Amino acid sequence: MKNINYLLLLLIGMLLLPGLVKAQGNGKPALFNSAWSFHKGDIGTGISGAAAETQWKTVDLPHDWSIEGPFSDEWASATGYLPGGIGWYKKTFNGNAAWKGKQVYVYFDGVYKNSEVWINGHSLGKRPNGFISFQYELSKYLNLSGKNTIAVRVDHSEFADSRWYTGSGIYRNVYLIVKDPVHIAPWDVAFTTPDVSADKATVKVKVSVTNSNATDAAVLVKVNLFDGKGKSAAALQKQIKVKPGVHDVEFEQQLSSPQLWDTEKANLYKLQVSLNRNGKSFDEITQAVGIRSIRFDKDKGFFLNEKSTKLKGVCIHDDAGALGVAVPEEVWVRRLKILKDAGVNSLRLSHNPHADYLYDLCDKMGFLVMDEAFDEWEVGKNKWVAGWNVGTPSKNGYHEYFKAWADRDVADMVLRSRNHPSIIMWSIGNEIDYPNDPYTHEVLNTGRNPQIYGKGYLPDHPSASGLTPIAKQLVKAVKAVDTTRPVTAALAGVVMSNEVGYPEALDVVGYNYQEYRYPEDHKKYPNRIIYGSENGMAQQAWNAVDSNEYISAQYLWTGIDYLGEAGKWPQRSNGAGLVDLAGFKKPEYFFRQSLWSAKPMVYVGARAITSTEDKGIWSHRTAEPVWNWQPGGKIKVDCFTNCQEAELFLNGKSLGKQSRSAAKGQVPSWQVDYEPGELVVKGYNNGIEVSTNSIKTAGDAWQLKTIADNASFKANTKGLSQIEVYITDKDGNPVFNATDEVTVSVTGPAKLLGLESGSTSSHENYQSNQRKALHGRLLAYVQTTGKPGKVQVQVRAGSLKLSTVTLTIK
């Protein structure tokens, strides 16, 4: 009987699922991701052909077709040697009689790129930019009593159109929104905190109410603010008469003892704005908001809630290796936790607006965000095809649409995300002034120019004087929407931009890889607010921030490895990150942790003394966590630590204690005669041991070990388990040099989304359930379908002892 009741409830739930989209009330967005059809390639018959039932496959969104590959050197190094092309999507859904008299919208968080959308054969519009969110109204073309088909054509045939991997397709969430003719559009609530202190705060809410009727409408606008415990912090309302068009209504309230948002305690409030008539709410916008103050000072740096704060930042791109840019939220939860543990408190979202949920995560987890609009303006940059700075570049890209779309795109970026407390800067561009790529100036014949294409001034290139009027135009577009945050840009050719007044158009000025200019420009331009918007890994680059009060930030290139911006084939990814594509930590991660984290830590790694180190901007430390060397070899052992002292032990024998402050580069090091066994480092503060780390000599690969970040899920919703796979010896010691091919099999209500090793040059099929390990490890992404039951994930590699992970969906 119990099983029968269970099956009955399950059947009812399954019957209700298709209606969830229709049933979403009060104008709230409903996910519209399931059961789309996809066709790779163009359809000669146009939109009529989109209705055909041949050569389509069923996909759930988000979806990125480029990551399906295959990798090939016929494509571009800039975009990861992966294909572009043209694709079609369509989805058939039932109308709803309850929509009569309503306004129905489809909202796309991002489609890369050149999308055109139809409903029942009627074109709704085009959007060239692949990173900007947009919506269309479907209402007048809908069949409320029958079936409807929405179709989307995506044109990424210019595959070498970016300097990094962008993916292709409807790679972010899609929502269906049903609104009353009198309503609040998704971006039409603005929340600001003009005055903030520990004792009190002033909050302002501006609501734009749209009346699509031909006659006036009387509505009651309610604003409720709830603290993190659900307690009411403010309750305001106004009765208004809305004429046809858009009417703004503003609210202001002073709060006592506000719960301030910061990087350590990301206190959030819930803002609820509703429209009411006859005592009932008929439209509602609910958002998480935060109360905080931000301020940049030309001499003192950055202040969060009037507390001086150094921005310990990293740059990130959208992709996640095997998943392309169709990345489930859980992947970024794991990644952000890893970065947070390193002491990172700020993210630069390079070089485009990112997925909607990422901003929510930054709000919840306490990251300060620089949101960025463009990587090029009206003239195209070099997009390398045969390898970075190799051969003849492509010039395709966003510049083709800039003149017509730039103001709208940058304004939409700001409108969409302006209520996020995490965002502290709007960037209008990255390295638009890259010397000779494309802009040039006579000053390039003199001085020091760390980033330059070609040699000196190139008179056939566009003049740098063109930068300033466009910068002013974009700043104006941003400030028409939001004046509560400074507008910035990341400058690569500061010496050139200084000559034409580009920095003066900005509120704060980012310098890329030009730390040596800080003192000179701070003196020469005393009113300029300067910070590091993109920086290499060298310690002196951080010292330039740490030792200068007026420099507030460093943004490392990069936090995480990313697809594209690659060297010559077979390299297809960029390895500049603190962690690799699978989220595994590199030695450089621990060095950064030693500089940025307050929690006591030590890390021990080794390398042969005879090995050489590259000293380039993005060079990484080579102290690997491995203790397998040739007997009698001379080994250099490095310790990355934030403790006062570190002591090294080999097989229980002390090899000496060293002071961090006295060590070269603040890295205690020892030269050791190798002998197998265990190497242990201990960290001390005030003579007390506070942290320890060790590595052991590993034997032959013998078994597989797995660690799942999540093994229990709820039914009726998709969930993701990220399973770390390790090759170990019989005693469980990691075998760092193991490259065995691992096979992952999934049975039950789940599917394997992909396997990622972190390799920057592997051309293995990302759609396969087999992949070679790198450094003895691998990451498996397993997504549940939402149906209840048990999932068995079996991990095998040749004769090694296998491992099984059980996932439970209740």
Image (cartoon, helix red, strand yellow):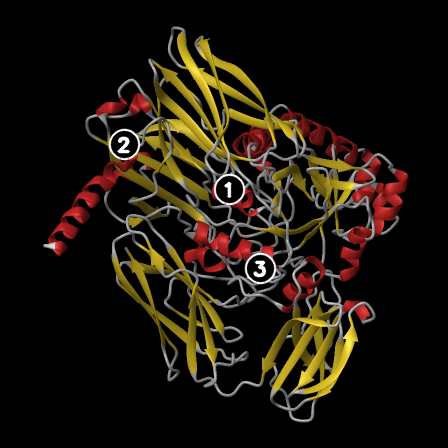
Counting from the top left corner in percent of width and height, residue 217 is at 39, 9
> Between marks 1 and 3, how big is the CA–CA gap?
22 Å
On screen, residue 666 versus residue 765, left or right, reads right
Q: On the image, numbered disc 3 is attached to which residue?
A: 561
- Quarter the C terminus occupies: bottom left
Q: Quadrant of residue 301?
A: top right
Q: On the image, numbered disc 1 is attached to which residue?
A: 360
**Callout 1 amino acid:** Asp
On screen, residue 158 versus residue 262, left or right, reads left
Tell me the crowding category of disc 1: few under 14, some 14 to 19, or many 20 or more residues within 10 angstroms, Cα based: some
Q: Nearer the viewer, mark 3 or mark 2?
A: 2
> Between marks 3 and 2, how big is the CA–CA gap?
41 Å
Q: Quadrant of residue 639?
A: bottom right
Q: On the image, numbered disc 2 is attached to which residue?
A: 23
Tell me the crowding category of disc 3: few under 14, some 14 to 19, or many 20 or more residues within 10 angstroms, Cα based: many
**Callout 2 amino acid:** Ala
- Disc on the earlier residue, 1 or 3: 1
* Residue shown at 56% from the left, 46% from the top: 161
Q: CB atoms at circles 3 and 2 under 8 Å apart?
A: no
Residue 541 visible in the snapshot: yes
Nearer-the-camera pick, 643 or 580? 643
- Quarter the N terminus occupies: bottom left
